[in-house]
Amino acid sequence: MNDYTPSEMMIVAAARALAGVRTVFVGVGLPNIACNLAQRTVAPDLELVYESGVYGARPARLPLSIGDPALITGALSVCSMADLFGLYLQGGRIDVAFLGGAQIDRYGNLNTTVIGDYAHPKVRLPGSGGACEIAIHARQVFIIMRLSRRSFVERLDFLTSPGHLGGSGERERLGMPGRGPQVVVTDKCVFRFDPGTGEMVLVSLHPGVRLEDVRAEMGWDPRVSPDLTETEPPTPEELRLLREELDPLGVYRS
Amino acid sequence: MNTGWTDGHRSTSVKTRAIYAHLCPIQMPEETVKLTTMHDAIATYVHDGDTVAIEGFTACICFAAAHEIIRQGRRDLVLCRMTPDLIYDQMVAAGCARKLVFSYLGNPGVGPLHAIRRAVEKGIPAPLELEEYSHFGMVARYIAGAYRLPFFPLRSYVGSDLPKVNPRIRFVESPYGDGPIAVVPPLNPDVAIIHAQRADVNGNTQLWGLLGAQKEAAFAARHVIVVVEEIVDEEVIRSDPNRTLIPGLIVDAVVHEPYGAHPSYVQGYYDRDNDFYLRWDEISRDEAATRAWLEEWVYGVRDRAEYVEKMGRETWERLKPAQAWARPVNYG
């Protein structure tokens, strides 16, 4: 039994992946906290960008949504969404973007549109929002999702946001500017992507998690890195920052 | 709050002017008749079957207009917004809409939009047609509409299934040999309803905080209703012209409606009512509870002023914003 929660492990793993990053496209929830933690640790020059139209946000409180008024107060720049999507995102100025979804496949393609048939869905999900263009343009995409069989599927019901598509260089052939998904952080493990095939590869298991636990929660048999390691657990300082300063009420880390 | 009225005569509503017109020997300039009530603005500019855009990305969403549209019993509307938010969830639950043009069906930061989901999944209260884009696609549609272009190009949708379910997203060959690019058609709403901090009586409107696609939607629309927290003197507007988002030139009606965006927010005036967004998640899960809420808070109040009073002083105290004044600049 670890003295940190699975969420705390996810936040810390995601924050570490932001080392040296300058501009990150943030959503709410875990990515938000991960970015805040990264700013205090491995990425002090990190600027938070929100698709609502904010560059260089410094919210005084945890935002409930990406349009929270606290994101505007004290930001470097607040602009229209035309500017945000055209100049910042399509203009190629976003280093990393966090995405998630109801379903993900082995190539990091994401579904946030429907479960079932589009015309008569079993579940109507929110849809793309900015995700489709974010997946295309961000220099790198980081994914944070809980590992579950329902989410990690062999075949998506709908492909909302392109990851590595069918793999093997398809993104490059289609001339997509961003490199696509690079990391998938889950509550059990971390995946990276094979640069040649574009397929998800298991690179580390969180402390206490076995390979069988991961396989049991996936709709396909994942590739496993020959250098499979244990994810380094959160350090006392990372936990202190999370628990005392960034999320004292435990909104996201519990 | 400062309500900077200019002259007494500029404050009269359309109806009042009509009553006294025969007594007034001087013809008033057209501009002065824009100031009106929410009731009259909706009655004049929103009709059954209209394409309506009430934009505002999380901020400055004119719920007051939506509630008046519901009260006046509008039907078969085509509702356009990037994120329908609670505003269209409420209008769909009330049976106002036949179609949504959108890019994200979420209660931002909370979860799904249950009333819209019920309409899409089960046809309750009526089937709902969907025309689905991405955020950038919606922005691009308003830009095409506002700039009077036949389409607007954007580097999106490659590899996505979205074009398969929305045939209005097309791909064209760049005439300069750069390969294919996605384009979307113009969106020209019959009416756009813009909520902002302040405007003068001619509709010169200043908005700060999140701008969303308000400007583009306004310039794309055939008619524009501006709803503001404060009416200010023209000289206030002229003192800071960079802050003017929408010129009175394109505005048909101006409505003074304090707290008109609640539960959404207006930067510097009131906070977002996050509690309400969370509560709506509970209420809207259940069809009966949703109808009961509409009965009490939309049909059961005459107008926004009564809604504001019913919400109670504690609500407005709770939503009071902090002070974060910008440094003034010299335009001399």
Image (spheres, helix red, strand yellow):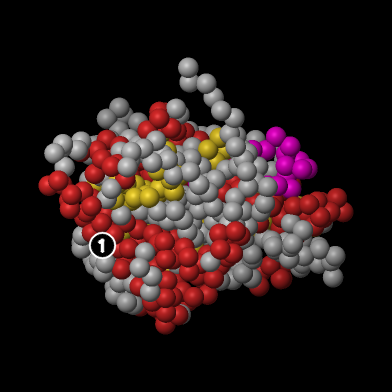
Residue at 44% over, 60% down: B85
Residue B84 is left or right of residue B142, and the answer is: right
| Residue range corresponding to the magenta coloring | A35-52
Seen at 74% across and 37% down, the residue is A44
- Quadrant showing the N terminus of chain A: bottom right
**Observer-nearest of B262 and A122:** B262
Residue A59 higher or lower than B27, as above or below = below
Q: Secondary structure beneath disc 1?
A: strand
Q: Residue A76 appears in which quarter of the rendering?
A: top right
Task: Determine whether, in the image, residue A168 is placed left or right of residue A145.
Answer: left
Determine the residue located farthest toward the right in the rendered image. Answer: A236
Query: Relative to residue B147, is residue B121 depicted above or below?
Result: below
Using the rendered view, name the quadrant where residue A214 is placed.
bottom right
Q: Position of residue A172 (x, y in %)?
A: 48, 40
- Image: B28 above or below B81: above
User: Which chain does the residue under circle 1 lie in?
Assistant: B
The magenta stretch spans residue B61: no
Binning the other alpha carbons within 10 Å of mark 1 as few (below 14), some (14 to 19) or many (20 upward) gives many
Residue at image point 42% right, 40% down: B4
Disc 1 marks which amino acid? Leu
- In the rendered image, residue A8, in percent from the top left (x then y), is placed at 75, 59
Of residues A51 and A77, the one nearer the viewer is: A77
Q: Can residue B310 be seen in this view?
A: yes
Residue that carries the numbered disc 1 in the rendered image: B77
Left or right relative to B42: residue A14: right
